[in-house]
Image (cartoon, rainbow, N blue to C red):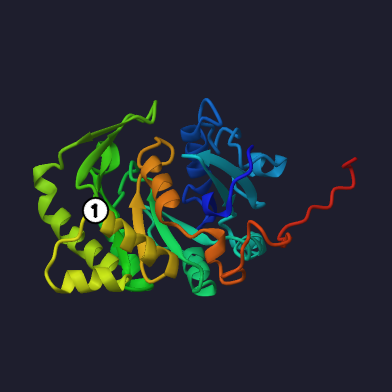
Amino acid sequence: MKVYPTSKIRNIALVGHGGTGKTSLVEAMLFNTGAIKRMGKVDDGNAVADYLPEEVKRKITISTALVPCEYRDHKINVLDTPGYADFYFEVTGALRVVDSIAIVLSATAGVEVQTEVIWEDFPEVPKMAFINKMDREHADFYKVLDEMKESFTNNIVPVQLPIGAEDNFKGVVDLVKMKALIFESDTGKINETDIPADMMDDVENYKEELIEAAAEANDELLTKYLEGEELTDAEILEGIKDATINGSTVFVFCGSALNNIGIKPFMDFIIDCSATPDTNPIVKDKDLDNEPLAAQVFKTIADPYYQ
């Protein structure tokens, strides 16, 4: 791996209740970067992040795994954390060193206990959300979105809307580009097309919500927006980035990690809009690329058999 400047590093933790598909999301990210040639599965015991014998046996994440991805000339350090309360100490350790959190939720189960615990325990860490398992029976994106707003804050805004659900889930609408993205799950290829006509009412409503969130995070954009001027896609993206980094809005994505649907746009968002290490309050205003090294140990392993 080459050396990356601070501006091209993203440190992000995948968190959420057990069984929401965090490890499967990591697997899809690795596949999309070319780090692996085929996607493993937790149930098959061949997922990259769940490598400990006990994890393979129990088919759950027990220990936080650091999985680096190289994507678009950036390095994304993904921390795949456990979702069960018994291993919560692994989550708290990981969240001490990341710059942002991706909360993974199930489209069928919605907001669950560990989701609430993490949200309440780490209010200061910038967050984004990924509603996974849109291909499953009883998947309901809008129900989960409403649950999130009721449980946490109204400042939860989708950047994507799902096209279909359950067996008919095939892609997402990108509310910034205003395009439908249809995915080929076996290759990860994305076909860009027009938004289905029957979705336009919802699309326009959520687009306006997205523009408002972007404008409110940036004084110049807010002035322009209040004066009735239309914001460009680049300006909306700039406002979204500001809102993501300062934590004023939690932007929501959706997809199916197992089928690699919706993962690449989520990775693009991490690159384009998520916090960089120099925005972390611990090191803010320091020149991280030129000052003496400062490091924080967040996880140690004692193995009596390691030589």
- Say whether residue 257 is left or right of residue 156: right
What kind of residue is marked 1?
Answer: Asp
Q: Which residue is mark 1?
A: 233
Q: How many numbered marks are there?
A: 1
Q: Position of residue 65 (x, y in %)?
A: 64, 48
Residue 104 falls left or right of residue 197: right
In the image, residue 280 lies at what x, y percent? 56, 67
Q: Quadrant of the N terminus?
A: top right
Q: Residues within 10 Å of mark 1 (few under 14, many from 20)?
A: some
Residue shown at 79% from the left, 52% from the top: 301
Secondary structure under badge 1? Answer: helix
At x 31%, y 56%, the residue is 237
Residue at image location 44% in from the left, 49% down from the top: 271
Q: Going by the picture, which residue comes out furthest to the front?
A: 290
Q: Is residue 31 left or right of residue 80?
A: left
**Location of residue 149 (image quadrant):** bottom left
x 63%, y 60%: residue? 288
Q: Which quadrant holds residue 67? A: top right
Quarter of the picture containing the C terminus is: top right
Estimate the x, y position of residue 152 in percent, counting from the top left.
38, 73
Viewed as shown, does residue 50 lie left or right of 196? right
Q: Is residue 237 above or below residue 221?
A: above
Query: Measured along the vertical axis of the image, is residue 3 above or below residue 96?
Result: above
Place of residue 113 in the rendered image (x, y in percent of width and height, measured from the top left) = 48, 66
**Viewer-side residue, 86 vs 125:** 125
